[in-house]
Amino acid sequence: MKVYEALQWASSFLKEKERDDNAGELLLRHLMGIDRAKFLASLREELEAATFEAFQKAVILHADGKPVQYIIGFESFYGRDFKVNEDVLIPRQETEELVYHVLQRIDQLFGKGDRLELADIGTGSGAIAITLKLEKPDLNVTATDIYKPTLLLAQENARTLGASIQFVHGDLLKPFIEGGKQFDVVISNPPYIPDGDMEWMSEVVTEHEPHRALFAGVDGLAIYRRLAEELSFVIRDQALIGFEVGAGQSGAVARLLEQAFPHAKIDIAYDINGKDRMVFAEIGFE
């Protein structure tokens, strides 16, 4: 069987199963160990029998609902590959925009030369914390997560990508409140999906990605409420807070931050698709 024939089979099979037919190319490129340019150049070459057998198994796994990223074991984020498994949420493209906005605001508010203390709360795969450290090496970055296996995977990603980060096991900001630790910047992409949304979401998400990283109470705001209550104990007089939020949640999250920090500058940032995806609080700046 030629490469293009295997690809056609996968596309047809995945369409029939109502999955993304483009997944076939990602899986086959991974199994062949080549980039897209080489893959396109090899479409009329013969595919090794063992590779096709592995490809069939992978395509069937995806048809049954397993995300491609968990099958191949990584996801690209900000130009780097992060190892992922079912202990962590798959990094999303929207979150790259949170990182971009945080980097821009750090430069605007603090200047480029300061060694700032930054915390990423609920780090998951470590994508936010590691990317921020690699993009701005002078940052002192701490990342925390409540689930130990998740933290171990984030540590592995940090080692692989060469990012020096302190990892802390704990529930949101509690370890820092108890330890008297303070930060200049606190970032979080917490769970924000209302529990009721599980009924209509794809099983690719609900049956494979960790629910503790997805769902947050009746209205999806449970973690934001806790963070808003705890933040004042861990931030310095001048500080930046940045959250990713679900579509339509920005107003409610902004109000939580306004109540917690009445004199802060609170603003909502939109992603490239025009969705209200980020909420920021700038505290103590003129």
Image (cartoon, rainbow, N blue to C red):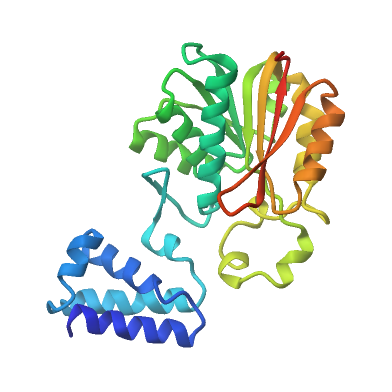
Residue 283 visible = yes
Q: Identify the residue shown where x is 76% and y is 40%.
A: 224
Q: Identify the residue shown where x is 37% and y is 34%.
A: 159
Tally the numbered discs.
0
Task: Using the image as rendered, state which of residue 265 and residue 229 is in the foreground.
Answer: 265
Side of 71 where 185 appears, left or right: right
Task: Using the image as rendered, state which of residue 39 and residue 84 is in the foreground.
Answer: 39
Q: Report which quarter residue 145 is drawn in.
A: top right
For the C terminus, the quadrant is: top right
Q: Report which quarter residue 259 is drawn in.
A: top right
Task: Using the image as rendered, state which of residue 282 and residue 194 is in the foreground.
Answer: 282
Name above or below for residue 286 compared with residue 212: above
Residue 105, position as x, y percentages in the image: 58, 26
Q: Report which quarter residue 122 is drawn in.
A: top right
For the N terminus, the quadrant is: bottom left
Residue 40, position as x, y percentages in the image: 21, 69
Residue 42, position as x, y percentages in the image: 15, 71
Name above or below for residue 171 compared with residue 72: above
Q: Identify the residue shown where x is 66% and y is 16%.
A: 182
Side of 55 where 248 appears, left or right: right
Residue 171, position as x, y percentages in the image: 69, 36
Q: Identify the residue shown where x is 34% and y is 66%.
A: 26
Name above or below for residue 175 compared with residue 72: above
Side of 237 where 2 appears, left or right: left
Name above or below for residue 101 compared with residue 149: above
Side of 87 where 286 appears, left or right: right
Residue 167 visible = no
